[in-house]
Image (cartoon, rainbow, N blue to C red):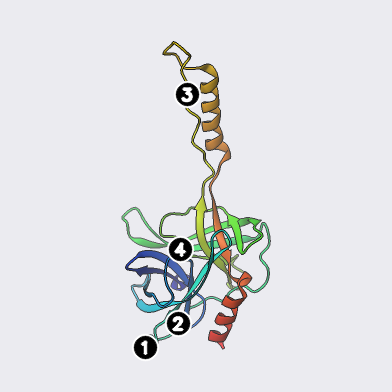
């Protein structure tokens, strides 16, 4: 699996991706790049390849998934994972594959087991795992089967946190003392943020984008 995860970079930014066919790497670019934009693709082994943005499907809060295609003079990917074709289910176990810096700031392969806890009425679903800047586009896969087979569910799009700023503490009129009600409201808000507002991550489900699945199938054939 670790040979299918890559860090991608462009003069405008960095991200990650997962290889899903001999010539395609799947990622999430948030609609920030034009088709044809060049990308450097680097694997944990040190191998480097070059490609360009082939197609992207992006609508805010609806879908965010892209295909980067290897340049013509590049040799095909030797390792890739198939994309899941059946519907994903709520409470289904998945794994998140990524490259993360360790304590010495060296990129290492990371695998996080988690579950899908909500499926949106779009191409997105929600899960919980540790996310950081630069993780966009890393792959989410199905649970590892007894025979070792895994399939790509989709790519990490974003992380969200529902924590809200607590209301300000007010002073009692004509006094330097704090108003008891405002203190109580502020403390309650902070408590709710710490205990009731866990962050969550969004994954774009690949098989809910038919045009993308068609492009992948053509490349595999």
Which residue is tagged 2?
A: 78
Q: Earlier in the sequence, mark 3 or mark 1?
A: 1
- Whether residues under marks 2 and 4 lie with C-beta atoms below 8 angstroms apart, the answer is no
Q: Is residue 65 visible?
A: yes
- Out of 45 and 192, give the one closest to the viewer: 192
The numbered mark at residue 2 is none
Q: Quadrant of residue 51?
A: bottom left
- Is the residue 19 above or below the residue 157 in the image? below
210 sits to left or right of 18:
right
> What is the CA distance from the residue labelled 4 to the residue labelled 1?
27 Å
Which residue is tagged 3?
A: 169
Quadrant in the picture for the C terminus? bottom right
> What is the CA distance from the residue labelled 3 to the residue labelled 4?
42 Å
Give x and y (percent) for residue 38. 36, 76
Q: Residues within 10 Å of mark 2 (few under 14, many from 20)?
A: few
Which residue is tagged 1?
A: 73
> What is the CA distance from the residue labelled 2 to the residue labelled 1?
15 Å
């Amino acid at each position: 699996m670790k040979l299918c995860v890559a860090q991608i970079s462009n003069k405008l930014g960095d991200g990650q991706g997962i290889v899903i066919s001999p010539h395609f790497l799947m990622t999430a670019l948030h609609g920030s790049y034009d088709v044809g934009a060049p990308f450097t693709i680097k694997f944990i082994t040190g191998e480097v390849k070059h490609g360009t943005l082939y197609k992207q499907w992006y609508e805010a809060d609806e879908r965010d998934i892209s295909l980067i295609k290897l340049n013509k003079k590049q040799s095909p990917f030797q390792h890739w994972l198939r994309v899941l074709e059946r519907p994903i289910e709520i409470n289904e176990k998945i794994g998140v594959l990524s490259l993360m810096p360790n304590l010495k700031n060296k990129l290492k392969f990371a695998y996080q087991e988690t579950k899908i806890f909500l499926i949106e009425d779009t191409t997105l679903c929600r899960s919980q795992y540790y996310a950081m800047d630069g993780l966009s586009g890393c792959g989410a896969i199905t649970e590892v089967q007894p025979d070792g087979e895994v399939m790509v569910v989709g790519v990490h799009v974003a992380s969200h946190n529902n924590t809200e700023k607590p209301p300000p503490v007010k002073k009692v009129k004509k006094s330097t003392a704090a108003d008891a009600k405002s203190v109580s409201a502020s403390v309650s808000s902070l408590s709710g943020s710490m205990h009731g507002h866990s962050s969550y991550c969004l994954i774009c489900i690949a098989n809910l984008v038919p045009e993308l699945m068609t492009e992948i199938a053509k490349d595999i054939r």
